[in-house]
């Protein structure tokens, strides 16, 4: 009797066997497809760079590396880059800490304005600061002329200042979030036990913040040494790795040497990415959760208050001045040199054409990026297959990679058949998709973690197939993450410079590249106006993003992620 | 320490002076007034509990005493000294936070010794004091442990030891038991109370749990909307609540309206006229007079419930038994009398089987009923 029933069941199900197989394995199939995409558009270009650095006209060779390590120029370039990274990281951490301390522990009155100013650079392309420094301190700069100074902005100092200003929001956001997660009662307890403000900082706050500070430091270091725009615009004759790579490729067409420089640049990034993600994972002091309360302002002793206020005011002032200057400069041919108020910079045809191109590229990138991001998040969170963490690692690695490396990688990988993409809009868009994938994926992951798998199981329990569950349950819930990934990719792509500068073809200029060229050639008005247009676009994106994260409480995951 | 007086005379005088005085304290956050004139005296060695619903201002008041929040108006006097403007690190008060706020990057011993180190105690004295404190909370074997390797109850003890390390004049406890599970909470409650009595340390305790407050305190301060509603011993608060809010806050209560029909001045026997007939009580308060409109405060456990319903003896009302929930040591009965529902707790329920089937029951109102005057409640 029992066997008869069983065979009956088996018979009935045999017709659906293929469907069942698909249903059961759809998530694995999806994962495989996504992995192929990652392998092809992210891993392959990097491997191509690596191979190119070892491949001479007659096969395997180490002579390019030999050249790198024997020529003083390259050594200087590496040294400058690392020194810039160290200085920039330290300064950004100090300023970021002071800002974060004041906005979380300082007087109520200062908290909001300081926070807003600290985050303002987020709406700007990083090279805005290089531009504003040229306007202020360049050879024809406002300050230079007013004080009749004879100094040289172009060089190491200029790059340090512009980079520092550009990376303040990243440092601030990371430190602020760790400070916010620090239970204020801990510091209050120390205060209660008789500790002074300085003692609290030394014995409680900083030791507890140390893991967070270290994480922030590593990230800032990686992003700084990889940053292209500021060093390229303000570097002058001082060599830095990222701009050197660019000149090597575009000026001398030496792909081998360019690849070597890229590998040298990528090595610390990969190292730090691993330290960041694996060694420091979970290195956080846990405390018992109570009601998280905003820290009440303490009577900060002048010994602490005065330096903190000075540092934060100078930083905030510098940020505001840079924005104001670029804004003003956008209405003059060259601010300080010509005195006619003009709108021609905004009406400039090539600038608007470049903006239009940028919007198109970023839009395509955003659509593809958001879709892939949501799907990747889904297979990473819900999948149970081997290599899941590897996929997660690869998809998050994009933004730790220097843009220049991915730029060269795409040039090497996709300029010849089987897949020739160079010269079109697609190579730019795909490059942006895979560079900025991390944020979409993270937004998706954090959204999925909010959804109990029981919801999907309930749907399956009620008889829905995998596809039905996915399209009727998962997708609607993931929609905010999709939109967030879309907008985030869009606004990051539209200001990004370091990779696309290798990939733009003549006659199809992007806004970021246009600003770069204009700044280098001294067309300050055009550069400023184009920058302001980008600022406006990013600002609108931010507002939409904010609105969505408020509506869906998706917040944290995206807003805190660095650019 | 203060100078000792001759033959203890000064000492006894000293002991009568309150340790902590709050004088007409107001606190504004912007235009929002969270404390609306709070005055209180806390005696030496006394355990006083601030209790009230969330948002009543109890935690703010505690933080004001600790110095973490600025006071808007009024004075705080600690052992005869006005401490309004002293920051927490210069006040002789110590606080124990709800989440213990133990330093996660330090060991148990380092946590307990933190205040001593800050106050520059010599190393050997610090070590001895830490040992003494850990023995006191029975954690002497745990000195080298990191904080996250302790259970919740152990963490609570470390926090307690740390707060006591510098022998503060007043100990402030902010909902110290709310992160523990129910059984441990009872154990720790007793331990804290024992230790507090042994050390004779003046303590201000904050909780939202009225039963915890009653069990642990010498006196309760019941707060609502930034004001003190009543100060009194647990017995006073429970048996003689000042108003309807307090009566309902410290336990379930049945209210019954009535008018005092007569008072026998000699025996203090009184008769209350209600819509269900006359109820005889023995007055234990003197704030009511003949003819007053009153609200009788009838506790569920003070009412006798029985099965026979017919005899017309005094204080006995007849009602319909709407529900009878038997739970072993207690049975919860819901009885409707007229259009009023009464909750009655029957302890040691004997005739449960019969009650389960009963429809009409007899309810006997006790003679020891507390009365609220009309202006103490809102009709």
Image (tube, coloured by chain):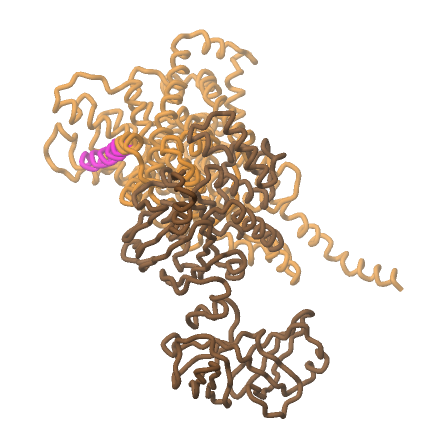
Query: How many numbered circles are shown?
Result: 0
Residue A182 vertical placement versus A280 (above, below): below
Q: Which chain is orange?
A: A
Residue B272 can be seen in this image: yes
Residue A421 can be seen in this image: no
Q: Which chain is brown?
A: B
- State the extent of the magenta-drawn residues as a range: A312-330
Q: Residue at x 43, y 28 (%)?
A: B120
> Is A376 on the left-hand or right-hand side of A81?
right
Q: Residue at x 32, y 15 (%)?
A: A238
> Is B27 on the left-hand or right-hand side of A365?
left
Which residue reaches farthest left?
Answer: A339
Residue A40 vertical placement versus A7 (above, below): above
* A328 magenta-colored: yes
- Asked whether B305 or A422 is in front, the reply is B305
- The secondary structure that dominates the magenta segment is helix
Query: For residue A32, which quarter of the picture?
Result: top right
Query: For residue A530, which quarter of the picture?
Result: top left
- Asked whether A484 or B99 is in front, the reply is B99
Q: Which residue is drawn at 47% across and 86% down?
A: B271
């Amino acid at each position: 009797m029992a066997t008869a029933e069983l065979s009956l069941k088996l018979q009935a199900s045999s017709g659906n066997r293929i469907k069942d197989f698909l249903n059961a394995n759809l998530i694995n199939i999806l994962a495989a497809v996504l992995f192929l995409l990652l392998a092809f558009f992210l891993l392959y270009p990097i491997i191509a760079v690596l191979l190119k650095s070892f491949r001479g006209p007659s096969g395997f060779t180490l002579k390019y590396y030999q050249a790198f390590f024997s020529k003083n120029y390259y050594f200087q370039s590496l040294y400058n880059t690392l020194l810039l990274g160290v200085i920039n990281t330290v300064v950004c951490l100090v300023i970021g800490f002071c800002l974060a301390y004041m906005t979380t522990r300082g007087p109520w009155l200062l908290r909001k304005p300081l926070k807003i100013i600290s985050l303002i650079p987020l709406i700007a392309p990083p090279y805005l600061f290089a531009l504003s420094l040229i306007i202020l301190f360049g050879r024809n700069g406002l300050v230079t002329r007013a004080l009749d100074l004879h100094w040289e902005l172009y060089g190491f100092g200029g790059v340090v200042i512009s980079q520092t200003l550009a990376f303040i929001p990243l440092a601030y956001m990371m430190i602020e979030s760790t400070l916010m997660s620090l239970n204020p009662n801990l510091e209050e307890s120390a205060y209660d036990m008789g500790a002074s403000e300085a003692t609290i900082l030394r014995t409680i706050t900083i030791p507890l913040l140390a893991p967070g500070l270290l994480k922030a430091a590593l990230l800032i270091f990686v992003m700084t040494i990889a940053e292209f725009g500021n060093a390229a615009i303000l570097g002058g004759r001082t060599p830095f790795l990222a701009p050197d790579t660019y000149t090597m490729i575009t000026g001398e067409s030496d792909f081998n040497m360019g690849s070597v420089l890229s590998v040298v640049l990528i090595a610390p990034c990969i190292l730090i990415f691993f330290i960041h993600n694996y060694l420091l994972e979970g290195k956080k002091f846990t405390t018992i959760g109570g009601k998280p309360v905003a820290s009440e302002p303490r009577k900060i002793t002048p010994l602490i208050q005065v330096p903190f206020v000075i540092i934060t005011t100078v930083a905030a002032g510098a940020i505001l001045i840079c924005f104001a200057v670029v804004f003003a400069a956008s209405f003059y041919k060259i601010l300080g040199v010509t005195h006619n108020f003009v709108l021609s910079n905004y009406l400039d045809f090539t600038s608007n054409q470049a903006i239009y191109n940028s919007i198109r590229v970023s839009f395509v990138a955003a659509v593809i990026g958001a879709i892939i991001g949501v799907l990747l998040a889904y297979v990473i969170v819900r999948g149970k297959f081997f290599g899941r963490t590897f996929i997660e690692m690869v998809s998050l690695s994009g933004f730790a990679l220097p843009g220049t490396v991915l730029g060269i990688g795409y040039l090497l990988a996709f300029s010849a058949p089987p897949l020739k993409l160079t010269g079109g809009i697609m190579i730019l868009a795909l490059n942006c998709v895979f560079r900025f994938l991390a944020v979409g994926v993270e937004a998706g992951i954090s959204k999925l973690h909010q959804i109990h798998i029981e919801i999907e199981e309930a749907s399956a329990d009620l008889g829905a197939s995998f596809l039905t569950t996915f399209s009727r349950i998962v997708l609607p819930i993931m929609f905010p993450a999709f939109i967030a990934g879309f907008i985030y990719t869009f606004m990051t792509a539209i200001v990004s410079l370091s990779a696309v500068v290798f990939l733009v073809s003549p006659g199809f200029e992007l806004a970021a590249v246009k600003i770069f060229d204009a700044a280098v050639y001294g067309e300050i008005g055009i550069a400023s106006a184009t920058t302001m247009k980008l600022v406006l676009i990013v600002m609108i994106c931010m507002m939409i993003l904010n609105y969505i994260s408020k509506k869906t409480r998706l917040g944290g995951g995206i807003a805190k992620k660095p650019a | 320490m203060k100078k000792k007086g001759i033959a203890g005379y000064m000492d006894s005088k000293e002991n009568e002076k309150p340790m902590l005085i709050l004088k007409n304290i107001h606190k504004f956050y912007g235009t929002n007034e969270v404390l609306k004139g709070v005055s209180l005296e806390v005696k030496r060695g006394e355990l006083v509990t601030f209790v009230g619903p969330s948002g009543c201002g109890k935690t703010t008041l505690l933080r004001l005493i600790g110095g973490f929040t600025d006071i808007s108006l009024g004075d705080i006097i600690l052992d005869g000294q006005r401490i309004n403007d002293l920051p927490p690190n210069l006040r002789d008060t110590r606080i124990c936070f709800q989440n213990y706020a133990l330093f996660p990057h330090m060991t148990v011993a380092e946590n307990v010794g933190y205040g001593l180190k800050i106050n520059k105690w010599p190393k050997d004295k610090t070590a001895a004091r830490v040992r003494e404190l850990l023995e006191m909370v029975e954690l002497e074997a745990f000195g080298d442990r990191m904080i996250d390797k302790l259970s919740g109850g152990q963490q609570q003890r470390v926090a307690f030891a740390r707060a006591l390390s510098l022998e503060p004049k007043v100990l402030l406890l902010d909902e110290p038991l709310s992160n523990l599970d129910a059984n441990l909470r009872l154990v720790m409650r007793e331990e804290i109370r024992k230790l507090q009595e042994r050390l004779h340390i003046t303590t201000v305790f904050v909780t939202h749990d009225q039963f915890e407050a009653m069990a642990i305190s010498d006196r309760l301060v019941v707060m609502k909307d930034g004001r003190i509603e009543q100060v009194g011993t647990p017995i006073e608060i429970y048996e003689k609540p000042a108003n309807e809010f307090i009566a309902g806050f410290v336990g379930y209560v049945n209210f019954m309206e009535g008018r005092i029909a007569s008072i026998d001045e000699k025996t203090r026997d009184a008769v209350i006229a209600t819509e269900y007939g006359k109820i005889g009580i023995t007055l234990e308060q003197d704030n009511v007079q003949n003819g007053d409109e009153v609200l009788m405060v009838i506790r569920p456990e003070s009412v006798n419930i029985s099965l026979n319903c017919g005899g017309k003896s005094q204080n006995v009302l007849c009602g319909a038994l709407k529900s009878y929930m038997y739970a072993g040591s207690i049975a919860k009965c819901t009885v409707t009398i007229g259009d009023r529902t009464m909750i009655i707790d029957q302890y040691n329920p004997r005739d449960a089987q019969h009650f389960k089937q009963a429809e009409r029951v007899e309810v006997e109102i006790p003679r020891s009923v507390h009365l609220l005057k009309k202006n103490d409640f809102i009709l």
